[in-house]
Image (spheres, rainbow, N blue to C red):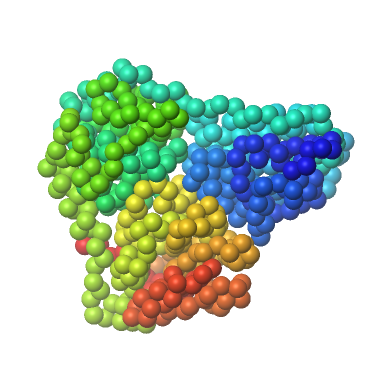
Amino acid sequence: MDTSASLTAGHLIVEELEAHGVSRTYLVPGESYLDVIDGLRDSSITPIVCRQEGGAAYMAVAEGRMTGVPGIALVTRGPGAANVKVGVHTAFQDATPLVVFVGLIPTDHRGRESFQEFDLDGWFSSTAKKVLTLDDPDKAAEVVVDAMHTAVTGRPGPVIVGLPEEVLVRPTSGTVLPPRVHGSASPYAGDVTELRARITAADRPVLIIGGEDWSPSTSRRIAQWSRDRGLGVLGTFRAYDGIDHDSPNFLGILGYGASPVAKRVLAEADLHIFLGCVRTDVATDGFSNGVDQRTVVIGPDADAHGHFGRLDQHIVTSVSRFAQSLFTEEGTRTYSVSSDGSIDEPPLGDDLSEAAGDAVPLPDWVAEARAELEAWRKPQVADSGSAASAGFVDMDEAFVHVHDLLPDDAIITYGAGNFSGWATRFLPTHGFPSALGPRNGSMGFGLPAAVAAALVHPERSVFCIAGDGDFLMNGQEMATAVQYGANITVVLNDNSVYGTIRGHQDREYPGRATATALKNPDFAAMATAFGGLGIRVERTEDFRDAFQRALEHKGLSLVHCITDPSVRGARLP
């Protein structure tokens, strides 16, 4: 960007975002922040123009989760701010770094119920870590630094920055500031020693992984350490991609749709180690399973926000710092440290414990639980006369083909609904980042998240599993995918019903289903109209070829599967 002329506050905001390593912003343009948009024109930041602010927010949340750098959303006042709130709530409950810049009315119009006026603090203070307003153009860089720092420190989360229209166009004497250092402190050597003693003393120690601050290298380190220590590993609800699911000690996912073996492992463990996450209602079936065991929480939040039940040791550090400490502290595996501070790790082959002088063999209970998990992962063959032969696509059998054809490095995205259970059960992931789902159960997340994943990782396959109700929450973002050349494959489960809610109705009010039936469009034709490839599939035997075509298509592709409205999820063994 040309800095020879005096900068406006709006242009300085863009330069400060560049200094923080921001590559993309997700936005719906508005007249209230035109100077920021103008600054983007001459910057290295790519503006991704979305079709609704909720979609923009979800894309920014997905980017923040994948990269650890706060995702950036830009929206206008009033209606734009209202639409973006669903993404703010998602980032808040998911503990994902997000910064939302909101254009505001001119300062001297405040308090007069002016066009699109709203109370920024009143709207967002309960679901954001901080709400800031730029009232002085000379503080533009300072406000951005504060927002970016707050979003990633401690428990990550959303920050809101209000931008009054007239302040943005004023010249500023401010200059670009360096980002604040926000590195988490490494755990004390005594903390690691105490943790190791707890693990040694336990008969069934279990590591529960989740949260933020994961990376491919952290994923490998934790997989190595957990196997060396003989730990069973469970993933938390929609934050389960911290280690490769092919690891012999990975025992399943907690939360809605959890396998019976994962629930049993949690209940029978005598030591719970929460890494990057805490004990929540979803993971424990409403605080009813596994709440009394000895407990260690490891994470950057000194308050252990949201943790329920017993807490015997609390190590306040980031996931990445903890992973590094395991390879440098005395008494654990030690590798050399490079001049740049990175750890020189040995190759991690099929036998992850090969170089470990102090590693312990995996105990029998881990091997037995692993065998049960692998059996549960296998789709059950349909009986004759079932949905597979009644004019519908059988999703259990369809996911046999998805599993076979989808590359191992695929990133899987989804929103909220029973349909996601086919992905979490039948599609193991292979290290961070490889799964994106909303931990607050927000519908419509899958497609926008897939767009962000395809832009952040264009070298990888991106697969979105969607329900019919879920997809139409943000189906308009197919236009964004096509506009920016995002390679995305969507499999859409069309059973013409809000299936999760219908299931609750059938249980609580049998025979009185109301307000859950859907009349759907031709989703394949929609995808084609948006510029993608749409394929309609009504029979199970036609699915494999359709999915193969969709994977081979460059750009947006969608496989529209007509499924049985009475089927709520995968068949049980």
Q: Where's the N terminus, which quadrant? A: top right
Q: Is residue 469 visible?
A: no
Residue 138 location, quadrant = top right
Give the residue at x 35% y 68%. Answer: 405
Identify the residue at the far front of this view. 339
Give the residue at x 35% y 34%. Answer: 344
Q: Is residue 101 above or below residue 429?
A: above
Residue 41: percent from the left, percent from the top? 74, 51
Q: Is residue 344 visible?
A: yes
Q: Is residue 458 above or below residue 224?
A: below
Identify the residue at the far left of this view. 364
Q: Is residue 33 above or below residue 550?
A: above
Residue 274: percent from the left, percent from the top? 34, 34
Horizontally, residue 16 falls left or right of residue 486, namely right
Give the residue at x 35% y 58%. Answer: 408
Give the residue at x 53% y 44%. Answer: 64
Given residues 259 and 463, the one toward you in this image is 463
Horizontally, residue 231 falls left or right of residue 286, namely left
Given residues 85 and 530, the one toward you in this image is 530
Residue 531: percent from the left, percent from the top? 60, 73
